[in-house]
Image: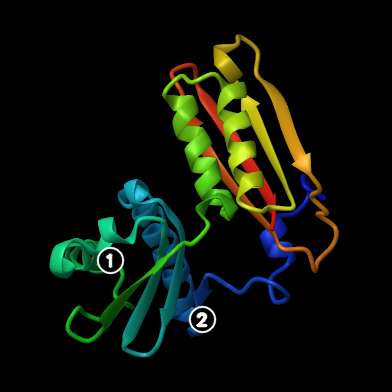
Amino acid sequence: MGKKINPRAFRLGNLFTWSSRWFASNKEYKNFVVEDANLRKALYRKLQGAGITNVEIERSINKINIILHVVRPGVVIGRGGSGLEIIKNFIHGIIFSKKSNKKIPSKDIVKLDIRVEPVKDPYLSAYFVASQVAEQLAKRMPHKRAIAQALDKVKTAGAKGVKIALSGRIGGAEISRREAYKVGTIPLSTIRENVDFAHVPSLTKSGYVGVKVWICK
């Protein structure tokens, strides 16, 4: 099951909800899908230092709500909310800079609201763990040590099971390979089990190494 379907998508509607929640006509739908993808990609890159784990987007007729789940909310908010203003201007620049997209209303019509939600247990978030492992691999830390530390922290946080898989030129090897490390149980076929999944690339000097993390909460 792990190689056939995304565990989060497999549980949509039962345990998880959609990260983008809105309704659009046929003409606007494709524009909103591309816009949401660009927003998430840009926010994950910009707020990497704040430990971002998830971005939720809600749209109404003249309003866009963006919910940021971060490990360190103080980094995002800043002093007196100055950080939120910077993020708002950054998002406005992404949404309204494309003149070719005429279906998106102007900046004066659409209101933007940003809410920051703290993450209580970061090591129960698959994306946070995967990004930590990917960052350590990029800094040339031995992969077995990085994975052992991640497995230990996830189990200490109270997870039922965790699995980490690496694929690519691990450790700078000439031939790419795949390695998987598992602790506890990960029942991927059981829909009622809360299994979080994330895939983050690690751009090492030797090449691309993919990091996949499954966490059963």
- For this orientation, the residue located farthest to the top is 174
As rendered, which of 27 and 205 lies closer to the eye? Answer: 205
Which is nearer the N-term, disc 1 or disc 2? 2
Q: Is residue 97 visible in the rendered structure shown here?
A: no
Tag of residue 45 = none
Label 2 belongs to which residue?
26
Q: Is residue 198 visible in the rendered structure shown here? A: yes
Left or right of residue 103: residue 7: right
Vertical comparison of 31 with 120: above or below: below
Q: Residue at x 44, y 26 (%)?
A: 138
Q: Looking at the picture, how far across and down is residue 160, in whole percent?
A: 74, 53
Quarter that holds the C terminus:
bottom right
Q: Are marks 1 and 2 in contact (CB under 8 Å)?
A: no
Question: 31 left or right of 184?
Answer: left
Residue under numbered circle 1: 100
Task: Tell me residue 95's x, y (percent).
Answer: 28, 67
Colour scheme of this structure image? rainbow
* Residue furthest front in the image: 156
Quick one: 17 or 126, which is closer to the camera? 126
31 vs 59, nearest the viewer:
59
Residue at image location 40% in from the left, 88% down from the top: 60
Q: Quadrant of residue 118?
A: bottom left
